Amino acid sequence: MATLLNKPFGTHGKVHQITPASAGWRYVGFSLYRLRAGELVSEATGGNEAILVMVEGKAAFNAAGRDWGVLGNRMDVFERTPPHCLYVPNGHEWQARAETDCTLAVCLAPGHGGHEARRIGPNGITLTERGKGTNTRYINNIAMEADDWCDSLLVTEVFTPAGHWSSYPSHRHDEDDYPRITYLEETYYHRLSPSNGFGLQRVYTDDRTLDETMAVADGDVVLVPRGNHPCAAPYGVDMYYLNVMAGPLRKWRFVADPDLEWIMKRDA
């Protein structure tokens, strides 16, 4: 099995590259670039569709034969403002030139055609509160199942305040049994403030044949091939993560950890 905790390769250039082959699964790919002003990167989507997320900074984009201008306005991800993103369908190329130092996430999953390239956000993305008490967190939905302009990708940002939990109560989406549950692979790209802090993420199955608890650092990526996957932000450390999900059916249906299902029933 692939290592669930992925450290960045370095601090500059392409610092993450997760493919279905490297992850040991079938659908989700994720890459991350940390660029200096003036640097240029380009990729072909091939058989995948892509959502390019400007995590921080600004870049000028050309994609699918069109000039999209400069995207990005959030210079620090913990501003919590809506991201600027770009959807690029399969079978096309894209290019980005950094206008400032920037962080660019590339979210990938199989594309089947029939969709047009499009800008996503900041308009139409609203920071939404979810949860109660120390389970409160804040969501920027970039592409969820109500959005019918892509084939496979489900992408969202989550801001978890210091001392809070998220992706909790623990839940899983690792069976293809719609409408009860859907099979979705998932990556978590973590950021922390302050950056020298740490967060926690556990990935575990109900029968505990998989049970890993990881201390995540700023910039780490966690793979969730199956099982429950809660996160915790310690006192004094705010947590951000960018989620990418995909599977055979573009719907998000999950089942709670039976030991914690009572929390969901109580808070309903």
Image: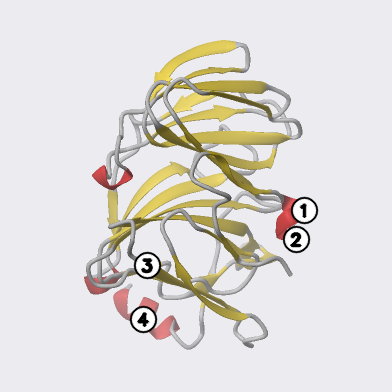
Amino acid type of the residue that numbered disc 3 sits on in the rendered structure: Phe
Badge 4: few (under 14), some or many (20 or more) residues near its Cα, within 10 Å? few
> Which structural element holds mark 1?
helix
Badge 2: few (under 14), some or many (20 or more) residues near its Cα, within 10 Å? few
The mark lying in front, picked from 2 and 3, is 3
Badge 1: few (under 14), some or many (20 or more) residues near its Cα, within 10 Å? few
Q: Nearer the viewer, residue 251 or 50?
A: 50
The mark lying in front, picked from 4 and 3, is 3
Residue placed under numbered mark 2 in the picture: 24
Please provide percent x and percent y for residue 203. Answer: 55, 74
- Identified at 29% across, 41% down, the residue is 76
Q: Tag on residue 21? A: 1
Res. 90 image quadrant: top right
Q: Tag on residue 198? A: 3
Q: Earlier in the sequence, mark 2 or mark 3?
A: 2
> Which structural element holds mark 4?
helix
Res. 194 image quadrant: bottom left
Please provide percent x and percent y for residue 41. Answer: 58, 25
Q: State how far apart marks 4 and 3 are (Cα).
A: 26 Å
In this rendering, position of residue 148 left or right of residue 193: right
Q: Earlier in the sequence, mark 1 or mark 3?
A: 1
> Which structural element holds mark 2?
loop
Residue placed under numbered mark 4 in the picture: 263
Query: Could you tell me which quadrant the N terminus lies in?
Result: bottom right
Amino acid type of the residue that numbered disc 2 sits on in the rendered structure: Gly
Above or below, 154 relative to 190: above
Amino acid type of the residue that numbered disc 1 sits on in the rendered structure: Ala
